[in-house]
Image (cartoon, helix red, strand yellow):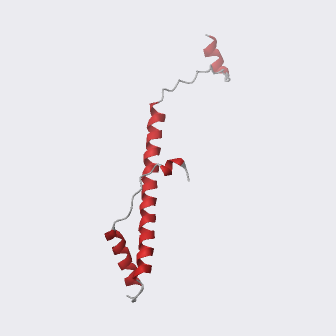
Amino acid sequence: MSRAIDLLPDIRPTTDQIAERAYQFWLFEGRPQGRAEVHWALAEALVQAEMDRQLRRTHHLRVGAAEEVRRDAAVKQPAPRSRRRATHPRQRSLTAV
């Protein structure tokens, strides 16, 4: 795991979030009896994974924006101007003057 991800805060889903997702699983499976623990475990894992994904995405956007600001703020040296050599006969006569 990368060092940046290790620095992300540890956020846990609430009981209400898990209960809502477990209820959705229960309804989807046709309201079976005796599967509450399975639905709860699935819901807890899914909600946690969604929260982690969102947190990483948010962190990635913040890091990317900060790098872009640093890049734009850097003082850029202008590129040295090169003297173009006239290649067309009319241009040669104008540059010779």
Question: Percent from the top left, x then y, of residue 47?
Answer: 41, 67
Q: Quadrant of the C terminus?
A: top right
| Total numbered labels placed on residues in the image | 0
Residue at 55% of width from left, 50% of height from top?
2
- Vertical side of 92 occupied by 29: above or below: below
Q: Which percent across, then down, holds residue 84?
A: 63, 21
Is residue 38 shown above or below 72?
below
- Is 92 in front, or is 1? 1
Which residue is most to the left? 16
- Return the residue found at the far top: 97
Q: Residue at x 31, y 70 (%)?
A: 16
Q: Nearer the viewer, residue 57 or 20?
A: 20
In this rendering, position of residue 29 left or right of residue 92: left
Residue at (57, 24) in percent of width and height: 79
Q: Quadrant of residue 85?
A: top right
Q: Where 29 falls versus 77 (above or below)?
A: below
Q: Where residue 14 sits: x, y (%)?
A: 34, 66
**Residue 57: % across, % down:** 45, 54
Residue at position x 48%, y 29% from top? Answer: 74
Q: Quadrant of residue 43?
A: bottom left
